[in-house]
Image (tube, coloured by chain):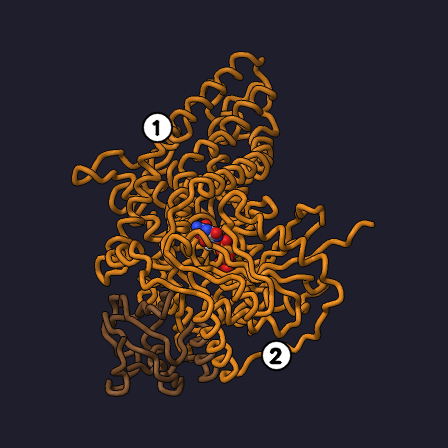
């Protein structure tokens, strides 16, 4: 397991390349600039399993602007746009 | 003493198998498919438990929480909380989980517990979990959650036996337990805490192998490749439309000659007169000319059902998200729009999964531009009459190519309309987020495909027997009466009401190249698009005289110019020729205005497109 999370730099999942794996450190909806309110965006992300400590892997990306991305969150795969994924801080 | 009806409700995250379970319990045939957001309505069914208890069970749209963010989720929330008008709260909630993916369901379940409703956790898809080597300590899970837990395999015979037994057990001791409802929308902190709690329970009770579904990963590597994925999507659509033409041809010819033979038979056995004309021209030439298209309808549904059951739809939505976003469409709009290829009505209903009101409205407005299966008869008829069946580049059927072009024209104009709506009406628009679960692929199940096709084929035939038939009777009547005066030399139909009406409308439609026969066919065609084909069949059959057992396609080829044919195709890409679609738009938007808007804009587009097509074609010498 990667216990090096403390040493890895924190970054938003929205900037991650395909193949990136990491662990969610925190959610920060204010950074995302989504059309949703901060509370709504955070709620939705949690409801899809994006909580602190969950392992994520960027499996696929779209063609235009490499957007959206398909993210493996523990045992499921979720498609999100990079804009919303900016709210997910990983390391 | 007869026990009162026991009320069950199926609640759970999307795509966990609630509807499959509902079908297994009640023997119904509600739509099941492998993507989130299939069920958008509440459906009630009934069954009897092994111990003889009468049960009513309600299938609900899937949801991740009780917050009710979109119209489908609101239905579930209102039902569970007992807010739905005239509904009692369910006696027992069956919380249905996909056993391979418990995190989200257990969190939902912890939230549901606050409603105070008695509840059972159903670990569905247990076969898949077992195959993957996932083991669940069911007893421990039940203890941790404080409620009964049962496994089930909704799609296997006898896969719900344990659930049935448990229902009997639980219902026997229900009564007194009515707890107070302490549910309120969870704050972000509470939500997070619930998810943590759920994760803890899962860590204690479930052992996951570190082996994800390798098949899904392998297929996705190709299908979701940024470039390869789009190529695959285009290929699938292309093969689909080619198949509609190429594969259906032999069967259609068989049906065609069957109806011809029937027509001949009626002609030969019955004495000449009204009855003979009614059966031969009205029923056989009219309704028969529509039924001939059954093979094509079946093929298009076969493709769509296979894609849905396999799990491709959500992938297609992923691939198309940014491309559709460019036209101002919501990512979740893709599946409703693709369903509209079958029929706009379920497509418009499926927009309920879209949370943003304006995005939903835009999708509803453009859904009728997708080429629905009712246009297939019109397109096929005209294409086979006017486009030569030769191959281009050796392997592409030219007729199939034109068909593909018509579908493409529908899609492109839908995107264009959406773009204009966003540009002119919703300027302050910020793109709504796209978040969609991509389910693991599942082998399509023969039984569900067969049932799916059977249901659709039956619907088509019932329509042919009711709507289309009654329109045909009307058309035949209009085209046959009044009868010509004795000694008249012109064709009999020239004296009929149909000719009078058609000729009155002709000046309006002459600029787009339509003759009076088309004008007559367009009016009943408002009821349903296929009717136009049937109406043309009848009008030309009557006009052609008693011996004319010719197929309608051959008749058209001699009576219409190529320009008229192309203009008719252009008309049908856009024309709002379907009363049921308009009625659904009115219901789903809750307003007559939007229905009127749809009708008007489509009619204007249809007229404009036909006008341009006709005049260009005439200028190029096809008049
Ligand atoms: N192998 C297996 N497949 C299942 C089982 N239950 C459901 N499925 C499949 O899972 C997919 C989803 O089933 P649905 O019944 O449509 O799911 P749902 O919960 O009603 O979904 P929504 O209406 O979208 O919320 C379909 O492809 C089913 O064939 C099961 O027990 N075993
Ligand atoms: Mg369902």
Q: Please tell me the colour of chain B.
A: orange
Q: Residues within 10 Å of mark 2 (few under 14, many from 20)?
A: few
Relative to B418, residue A55 above or below: below
- Does A55 sit left or right of B164 as displayed? left
Q: Quadrant of residue B207?
A: bottom left
Residue B532 visible: no
Write down the residue under mark 1.
B250
At x 56%, y 64%, the residue is B589
- Tell me which chain the residue with mark 2 is part of: B
Colour-to-chain, brown: A
Quadrant of the snapshot with the C terminus of chain B: top left
- Does B500 sit left or right of B232 as displayed? right
Write down the residue under mark 2.
B184
Q: Residues within 10 Å of mark 1 (few under 14, many from 20)?
A: few
Q: Is mark 2 within 8 Å of ligand 1?
A: no
Choose between A67 and B496: the one closer to the eye: A67
Choose between B289 and B88: the one closer to the eye: B88
Choose between B54 and B393: the one closer to the eye: B54
Q: Residue furthest left?
A: B393
Estimate the x, y position of residue B245 in percent, counting from the top left.
33, 37
């Amino acid at each position: 397991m990667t216990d090096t999370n403390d040493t890895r730099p924190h970054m938003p999942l929205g900037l991650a390349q395909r193949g990136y794996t990491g662990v969610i450190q925190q959610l920060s909806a204010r950074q995302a600039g989504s059309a949703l309110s901060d509370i709504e965006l955070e709620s939705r992300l949690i409801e899809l399993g994006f909580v602190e400590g969950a392992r994520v892997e960027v499996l696929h990306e779209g063609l235009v602007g490499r957007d959206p991305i398909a993210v493996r969150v523990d045992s499921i795969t979720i498609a999100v746009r990079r804009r919303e994924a900016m709210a997910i801080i990983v390391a | 003493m007869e026990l009162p009806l026991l009320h069950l409700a199926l609640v759970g995250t999307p795509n966990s198998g609630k509807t499959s379970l509902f079908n297994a319990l009640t023997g119904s045939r509600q739509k099941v498919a492998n993507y989130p957001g299939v069920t958008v309505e509440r459906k009630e069914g009934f069954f009897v438990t092994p111990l003889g208890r009468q049960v009513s069970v309600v299938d609900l749209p899937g949801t991740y929480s009780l917050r009710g963010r979109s119209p489908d989720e609101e239905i579930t929330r209102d039902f569970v909380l007992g807010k739905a008008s005239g509904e009692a709260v369910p006696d027992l909630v069956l919380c249905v989980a996909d056993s391979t993916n418990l995190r989200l369901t257990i969190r939902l379940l912890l939230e549901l517990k606050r409603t105070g409703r008695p509840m059972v956790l159903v670990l569905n898809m247990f076969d898949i979990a077992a195959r993957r080597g996932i083991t669940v300590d069911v007893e421990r899970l039940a203890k941790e959650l404080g409620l009964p837990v049962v496994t089930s395999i909704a799609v296997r015979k006898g896969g719900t036996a344990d659930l049935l037994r448990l229902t009997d057990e639980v219902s026997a001791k229900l009564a007194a337990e009515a707890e107070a409802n302490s549910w309120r929308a969870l704050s972000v902190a509470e939500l997070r805490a619930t998810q943590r709690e759920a994760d803890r329970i899962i860590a204690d009770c479930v052992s996951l192998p570190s082996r994800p579904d390798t098949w899904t990963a392998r297929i996705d590597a190709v299908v979701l490749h940024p470039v390869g994925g789009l190529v695959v999507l285009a290929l699938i659509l292309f093969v689909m439309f080619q198949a509609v033409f190429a594969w259906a041809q032999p069967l259609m010819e068989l049906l065609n000659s069957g109806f011809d033979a029937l027509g001949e038979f009626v002609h030969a056995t019955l004495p000449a007169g009204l009855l003979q004309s009614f059966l031969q021209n009205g029923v056989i030439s009219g309704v028969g000319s529509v039924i001939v298209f059954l093979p094509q309808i079946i093929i298009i549904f076969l493709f769509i059902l296979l894609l849905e059951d396999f799990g491709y739809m959500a992938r297609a939505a992923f691939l198309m998200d940014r491309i559709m976003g460019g036209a101002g469409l919501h990512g979740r709009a893709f599946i409703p729009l693709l369903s509209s290829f079958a029929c706009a009505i379920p497509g418009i209903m499926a927009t309920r999964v879209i949370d943003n009101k304006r995005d939903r409205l835009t999708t509803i407005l453009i859904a009728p531009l997708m080429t629905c299966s009712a246009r297939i008869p019109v397109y096929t008829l005209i294409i086979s009459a006017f486009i030569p069946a030769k191959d281009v580049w050796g392997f592409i059927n030219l007729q199939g190519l034109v068909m593909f072009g018509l579908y493409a024209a529908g899609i492109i104009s839908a995107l264009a309309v959406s773009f204009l709506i966003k540009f002119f009406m919703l300027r302050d628009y910020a793109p709504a987020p796209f978040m969609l679960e991509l389910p693991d692929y599942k082998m399509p199940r023969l039984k569900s495909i067969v049932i799916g096709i059977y249901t659709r084929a039956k619907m088509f035939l019932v329509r042919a027997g009711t709507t289309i038939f009654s329109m045909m009777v009307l058309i035949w009547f209009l085209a046959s009466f009044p009868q010509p005066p004795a000694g008249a030399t012109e064709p009999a139909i020239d004296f009929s009401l149909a000719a009078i009406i058609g000729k009155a409308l002709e000046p309006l439609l002459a600029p787009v190249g339509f003759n009076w026969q088309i004008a007559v066919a367009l009016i009943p065609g408002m009821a349903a698009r296929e009717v136009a084909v049937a109406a043309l069949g009848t009008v030309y059959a009557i006009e052609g005289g008693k011996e004319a057992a010719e197929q309608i396609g051959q008749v058209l080829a001699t009576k219409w110019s190529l320009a008229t044919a192309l203009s008719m195709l252009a008309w049908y890409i856009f024309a709002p020729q379907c009363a049921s679609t308009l009625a659904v738009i009115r219901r789903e938007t809750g307003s007559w205005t939007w229905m009127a808007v749809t009708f008007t804009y489509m009619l204007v587009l249809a007229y404009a497109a036909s006008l341009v097509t006709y005049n260009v074609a005439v200028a190029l010498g096809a008049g």
